[in-house]
Image (cartoon, grey):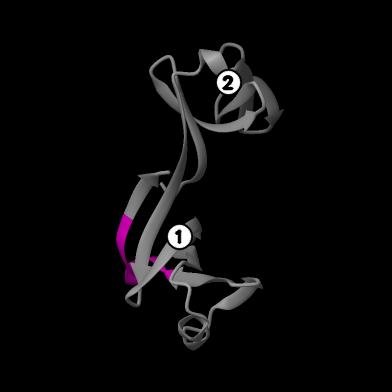
Amino acid sequence: MIRDGYVARWRGREYLASPDGDDVRLYQPEPGEGFEEVRPGRYVRVLPLTEVDDLAYVRTTCTWQGQPFIVLGEHEGWLRVEYTGGRWPVARAMGLEVFDFGVYQGWAPAGEVADLREKRV
């Protein structure tokens, strides 16, 4: 699974999460005690941050064509990647899209990506 966002550990289980001040929202795809449906297949439970065992940001990284990237998502055998090498001539030569000033993104075939790993930051 490709992840780029917050995760929280609560009662021995890890959830996708969203911190909000002194609270944290936990998300899961199925109904559960204390979880409310916010849309089909998405359930949320809000807890005080003090009740959560751990809260961290998880990011998936990789290399593609020898360059460093963050993986933002996946779709049908492709990975949405963001270049982290900081060299615009390299990003331009790779045909990446300018997403914002100094931010370059593109779609990489999943089979061409190497060193796919998850990091807690």
The 10 Å Cα crowd at callout 1, few under 14, some 14 to 19, many 20 or more, is many
Relative to residue 116, is residue 44 depicted above or below?
above
Is 115 one of the magenta-colored residues?
yes
In the image, 22: left or right of 68? right
Give the alpha-carbon distance from disc 2 to disc 1, as whole Å: 31 Å
> Which residue is drawn at the image coordinates 46% and 46% (left, top)?
3
Res 61 seen here: yes
| Mark identifier at residue 31 | 2
- Residue at 32% from the left image edge and 75% from the top image edge: 66
> In the image, 71: left or right of 65?
right
Under circle 1, the secondary element is strand
Quadrant for the C terminus in the image: top left
Q: Which residue is mark 1?
A: 70
Disc with the residue nearer the chain's start (2 vs 1): 2
Magenta-colored span? 109-116
Give the percent coordinates (x, y) of residue 46. Answer: 64, 19
Dot in front, 2 or 1: 1
